[in-house]
Image (cartoon, rainbow, N blue to C red):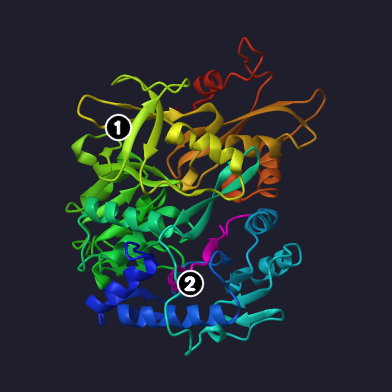
Amino acid sequence: MGVRDFTVYDMICRNTGLFPGKDAVVSKAGRLTFKEYKEKCDALAAGLLKEGIKRGDRLGIVSQNCEEFMVLYGAAAKIGAVLLPVNWRFQQHEVEFVLNDCTPRFVFAGPEYVESVSEAAGKVPSIEKRYLIGAGTPPSGFVSFDDLYSESGPGADPDIPADSGFVIIHTAAVEGQPRGALLSQANVIFSNLQLMYGDSLGPDDCFLCILPLFHIAALSTAMAMMHAGGKSVIVERFDPEEALNLVAREGVTTLMYFPPILKLLIDKYKEGGGTYDLSSLRHANGLDSPENMLAFREIAPQAQFGTGFGQTEAYPVSGGPMDARPGSAGRPSPLARVALFDDYGNEVLQGTPGEICVKSPVVFSGYWGREQDNARTFRDGWHHTGDIGRFDEDGFLWYVKRKAEKELIKPGGENVYPSEVERVILGHEAVAEVSVIGVPDDQWGEAVKAVCVLKPGKALGEQELIDFVGSKIARYKKPKYVSFVASLPKTQEGEVDRDRIKKEHGGKY
């Protein structure tokens, strides 16, 4: 590590010196102070090194949120290994694709995912060892996670530069295949600084981590909170009553959410007669409808809602208090230069929509093993997000829509590409044509809708098609709504007219 580098492990060492006895991570396993957290990271790092893990090796994990998840992040940072968190909502073949895509040497499995990882291990040649997270006797083919901790290790820290890979998070599928976005340790550190600045995070703050740690929002906020010397409460599975109790018990100041979390919290709060103490909350950041945010503000009036734009590949890009310019995505973050370009690479005028492009130390290292995609994404010295926005006269960024090739639906904060769902639906023998769009949804914020044309003489029910898709890909990607039509509108070029379908079938722009 160079004298001018600062890594995630440096952050852990710094905080151990500043806040040794202060809680860093709280989970169902108990509490870890900053000193205890570093000791666990060191012991796990030593064990990984003894097992032959080297800088750049990938470590897969399929698990609910837990203490071990956080320790793995810290240990990987120390030795320069790259964590590969797998979305546990994926179907089996999707899990296997992600693991094959990034060839991890070890895979760590929560108790619920032992069978899935066992099956995948037979199809992913790179997997050398499997570890069971949690108590209990490991099943055949697995070693206990706790056995990997080692009291003795190398005397000096490995020489890990800040631009070393840290985590690969697979984004939604393009052309039917998820792409692994590689984030470096430096990406995480610079993201931390911007999030700390935006929410004025400090040692007295506490993050309630109810989103999964394979998601950029949960990981980034947990890391930023740790960097600030604050506490992260890691929740295995979201339960509204438990979450409300934890806010009071742990003094939670920061909450990240996706639909339907706010609605469930509001309903449980009212069901309890308003007896839950939410007075510690300072920040509520995420995606939801204005109606739910207003309703939540009634039960936690002191909490400030944040807005912003970001993606796995660059987080955050813009942000600020929602009230500063309601409806906007805030202003560019302190370490982000944002410009809008047309399809010919020309910067557009103020007020004119253009593709949101970014230069920032939070921009990811690239898609794993996809040089062609990287060349296109980073063309002309900018990261092209694939999203369209416009700037107003005061420098606030307004989100407009997604570019056609990056059409995206976000049910409950997850990413779903219509092209992937369309590919699956077209695999049904009764379907001739389909267009998948996103529509407003009270429960999930946005839902998947399939507009289908059946083959002559074929019959198909809505639920039958929904179940068919749910059996092929992650269930959050299946349509919630299905419409059968005689034909799909076409453009002059003969392509499906998606804009017209959205207008006619309630789609979002």
Q: Could you classify mark 2 by the number of other residues whose Cα lies within 10 Å: few (under 14), some (14-19), or many (20 or more)?
A: many
Q: Callout 2, which amino acid?
A: Ile
Identified at 53% across, 33% down, the residue is 406
Residue 237 image label: none
Pointer 2 or 1: first along the chain = 2
Identified at 59% across, 35% down, the residue is 418
Residue 20, percent from left and from top: 26, 81
Instruction: Report the magenta residues as a range.
Output: 71-90
**Secondary element type, mark 1:** strand
Q: In which quadrant of the rendered image does the N terminus lie?
A: bottom left
Residue 93 position (above or below residue 435): below
Identified at 35% across, 51% down, the residue is 262
Front position among marks 2 and 1:
2
Residue 282, percent from left and from top: 21, 56
Residue 80 belongs to magenta span? yes
Residue that label 2 marks: 79
Residue that label 1 marks: 397
Say which of 332 and 426 sits in front: 332
Q: In which quadrant of the rendered image does the C terminus lie?
A: top left
Say which of 315 and 408 sits in front: 315
Q: Callout 1, which amino acid?
A: Leu
